[in-house]
Amino acid sequence: MESAVTSKRRAVDNIAISYTGIFDTEILSVLAKEIEGTLSPDDKVNKKVFKIFIELAQNIAFYSLEREANAEGSDTGVGTMVIKNFDDHYVFSTGNKTTMENIIPVMEKCDNINSMSREKLREYRRLQRNMPAGEKGGGNIGLIQVALTASNPLEYSLIKCPDGTYFYIISVRIDKE
Amino acid sequence: MMEDIHIEGVHEAYFTPTVNFEASTGRCEISGESYLEETSKFYARLIDWLKRYIANVKGPLSFDFKLSYFNTSSSKCLVDILDVLKNYQNAGGEITVNWYYDDSEEELEEVEDFILETGLDINKIPME
Amino acid sequence: MEKIDDKYDFSLYEYHNLLQQNILVSYKGPIDERIMNVIGDNIELVTNDGNDKAKSKIFKIFMELAQNVWLYSAESCNTASGRKIGMGTLVIGEFGDSYTFVTGNVVRNSDIEPVIEKCEIINSLDRDSLREYRREQRRLGGDKKNSGNIGLIQVALTAESPLDIELTPVSDDESFFSVAVKIKKSAE
């Protein structure tokens, strides 16, 4: 059975926690607690992964092209989150469906963020924070925050789906201390 | 006579910080975690209180931030609070701001950035 | 800077892509009360093509099998408070006129052999014999592991379909054990 095969692969793929489904508030809060409470024995690392999770998971909830109604009937994004555990680091990834039009600015932001030094990035965050409030700006700070928290570049990839939409994956490495 | 604000922190689907603003002493504290459904609305009430305190009570303000976690939307609102405090200070108000941070390089940086961002003097205190 | 893991990106896509075809919810990680609750609520939500009977069947099966993951998982993590939590995988899929519920976890071969035997017995029995088998196992009463066996009988009775089990070795003394059951959307 196909799904059993998937489960099996997950067992041997270094996956510590993974989730596919709707990214509604209830599930996000439980996943956040699992990360905070069980991921590693190092609270500092858990907190980093937790912070990155909150920012990137919110992006899926808001922006994923694939959407479902949650228990309250409100429209929520569907996506996938995977945390892989390696000897000296974790890799946190999220993936969701998108369109080329919507994702180009996000990829540009990632490139921009990756090109900056830590000092520059902090300056950029200060600048963004002083911009007038709005969800768009918020998402932007989110990515800066992820890069600053991880102290590693944002790696992304885009895969064309058979239905003509795209699947966007963003991954970041979190070093164990 | 101004009212106080007391909000009990909640750690459920969203995280509401604990808030204690005391009009008689000017002591204000925001602690716990801040990850809210309606971030601006939550903080608008706090900012409104501060503005009324500054306009009417005109007393000293001692502010303690003891947040172990806040998301980026909350951080924008925290800057708004700091801006209000800075403006009051510029106008001659007596202000003390203590920021308790989780003992890590990244969190210390974040406080330093708040200082740079707002020009406010903030005491950086590591959390126990 | 080297890429984190090129192949990895594609596997993430594959996982997600299954969702398009037939995976409704999938979770791998610590299985505790919180996850049970939230995934339990989720099941209700995603199985909206099924009738009420089908939904309640899936929920019952979910509760039994997720508990088995607790019981038998050889892979675990510790909470800050020192509590040990079993790790496992839960997948709810949709295939035509049925839902499929799959659980999987790493087990010690010595623990799982008797369970596999039980599954084989369960799959060979007709409904009436299965009910008798349940009565007999209940009378035995006893320990946690035995209640796990009754759980499997219960799952087969609820699903009205055989237990599709798979055991894949991951090391000399451990294997990945998965149980899949099918539940008709128009359950009676």
Image (cartoon, rainbow, N blue to C red):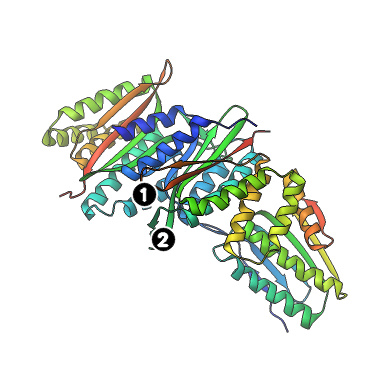
Q: Which mark is residue C14?
A: none
Badge 1 crowding class, 10 Å Cα cut-off, few under 14, some 14 to 19, many 20 or more, is some
- Label 2 sits on a secondary structure element that is strand
Residue C76's spot in the image, x, y percent? 48, 32
Q: CA distance from mark 2 to mark 1?
A: 20 Å
- Label 1 sits on a secondary structure element that is helix
- Which residue in the structure is indicated by mark 2? A75
Count of marks placed on residues: 2
Q: Which mark is residue C40?
A: 1
Say if labels 2 and 1 share a chain: no
For this view, does A25 lie left or right of residue C185?
right
The kind of residue on which mark 2 rests is Asp
Name the one closer to the observer, A117 or A5: A117
Name the one closer to the observer, A106 or B73: A106
The answer to whether residue A76 is above or below residue C77 is below
Judged by depth in the image, the label closer to the viewer, 2 or 1, is 2
Residue at image point 50% right, 47% down? A31
Q: Chain of mark 2?
A: A
The kind of residue on which mark 1 rests is Gly
Q: Chain of mark 1?
A: C
Residue B125's spot in the image, x, y percent? 80, 52
Residue A82's spot in the image, x, y percent? 49, 39
Residue B41's spot in the image, x, y percent? 59, 70
**Residue A167 seen anywhere in this rendered image of the structure:** yes
